[in-house]
Image: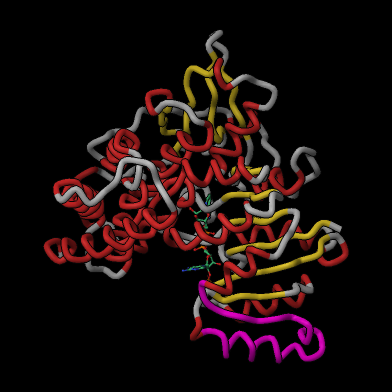
Amino acid sequence: MRKISIFGATGSIGESAFDLISRQGGPLAYETVALTGGYNVARLAQMAVELRAKCVVTAFDACLPELRGALNSYGARAQSIKASAGAQALIEAADQPCDWALSAIIGAAGLAPGFHVLRHGGTLALANKESLVTAGPIFMAESAKYGATLLPVDSEHSAIFQTLVGEDIATVERIILTASGGALRDWPYERLKTATLADTQAHPNWSMGQRINVDSASMFNKAMEIIETKEFFKVKPAQIEVILHPESIIHSMVAYQDGAVMAHLGAPDMRHAIGYALHYPMREKLPVPRLDFVALSQLNFKAPDLTRYPALRLAHEVMHQSGTFGAAFNAAKDVALDGFIAGQLGFMDMAPLVEETLSTLMRSNSLKNAPLSLDDVVQSDHLAKTTARVLAQKFS
Ligand code: NDP
């Protein structure tokens, strides 16, 4: 039986993975080594019982009593499940060997567990794009060093990966990332500054978590994906193009030097990319909607407006600088996002705050170009968060 672990099991991606695994027999088909979550301990306990997990971890110490209580309510069914909490417990869970692990924690907190999973050389299905944005070169090097199989779960990167099977990356001219434009894509530019959290949550095509819905509307998510593309596929920034595609049917495209363009199409359902990574290199039946081209009738494309989406321009600046700039960018973006979610920052204040944080850190020579270590990444994350929090006061 394949041994699996899910980091971030209670999130949007984690739930989709749980759905796939449960439909395929759950504990009869997979041995679940570890499941992790954060605040949603009731759901985490329920998942652990259903999959008969060996260990369960909440990222937050304060949630451990509630997690234990939730497990106790299952009586004998939960007796053998070991519960623990905190950052160190997450690392210990990641150190438990398994054949397949899903990295679906949100934010930079996903980096360290993913790093540890790579070290036992199994397969890491990577949804946590922050791992590549903050620490791409060392993350990829660690994967190669330990002979791990790293598979992308972001739908765009899974699409590109699938389109590249059997091809030589040296023959690629361009990678074309598609973007839905998020919930506010049809709003006039002038109105964007009044957007609220609720406005950003009505994603036209995908069902996702709260934070990524905001990032999708601001295109910070696409900015992260541009950097993720550069790191994962080792292409030049100039080879990466973003195109608005409101239907989210083409998940991305690869243009080759002979003029051919290969596109990956499918219904917007994350279970495709997760399922592909779960069964790789096989293609198994997946419970995702099938495309009906006649009903679709047309697919549309538009160039993104960089005034409306300054995050795309910032992504190119980060790639140009490299080193710890990715970690600082991600950290500043998270502070901006926290501020917007808390109602302290306007929707259009997020990008200026990120830009000002990066400029401040550059002026004080606080960011390193290269080489990079995990400690450098952690330090830059802290520094950028502190700087962004101070600067954020100007905007509120
Ligand atoms: P969610 O916010 O829905 O879930 C995040 C998960 O991480 C939850 O299990 C949450 O626990 C846990 N978590 C939150 N904070 C911490 C922390 N500090 N330490 C450890 N665990 C924590 O996120 P998504 O599922 O939407 O996204 C997960 C990752 O996948 C992100 O990197 C995102 O960019 C990427 N991704 C997501 C897509 C999507 O469709 N949602 C598509 C492609 C990529 P709890 O909920 O119990 O508090």
Q: Is residue 170 above or below residue 14?
A: above
The reply, left or right, for residue 350 in relation to residue 216 is left
Q: Is residue 90 above or below residue 159?
A: below
Residue ID at (70%, 40%) = 290
The magenta stretch spans which residues?
A: 63-87
Question: How did the renderer colour the structure?
Answer: secondary structure
**Quadrant of residue 339 in the image?**
bottom left
Q: Is residue 54 above or below residue 360?
A: below
Residue ID at (49%, 45%) = 138
- Residue closer to the observer: 34 or 288: 34
- Residue closer to the observer: 182 or 187: 182
Q: Quadrant of the N terminus?
A: bottom right
**Quadrant of residue 370 in the image?**
top left
- Residue closer to the observer: 320 or 197: 320
Q: Is residue 186 magenta?
A: no
Q: Quadrant of the C terminus?
A: bottom left
- Picture coordinates of residue 259 (x, y %)? 53, 10
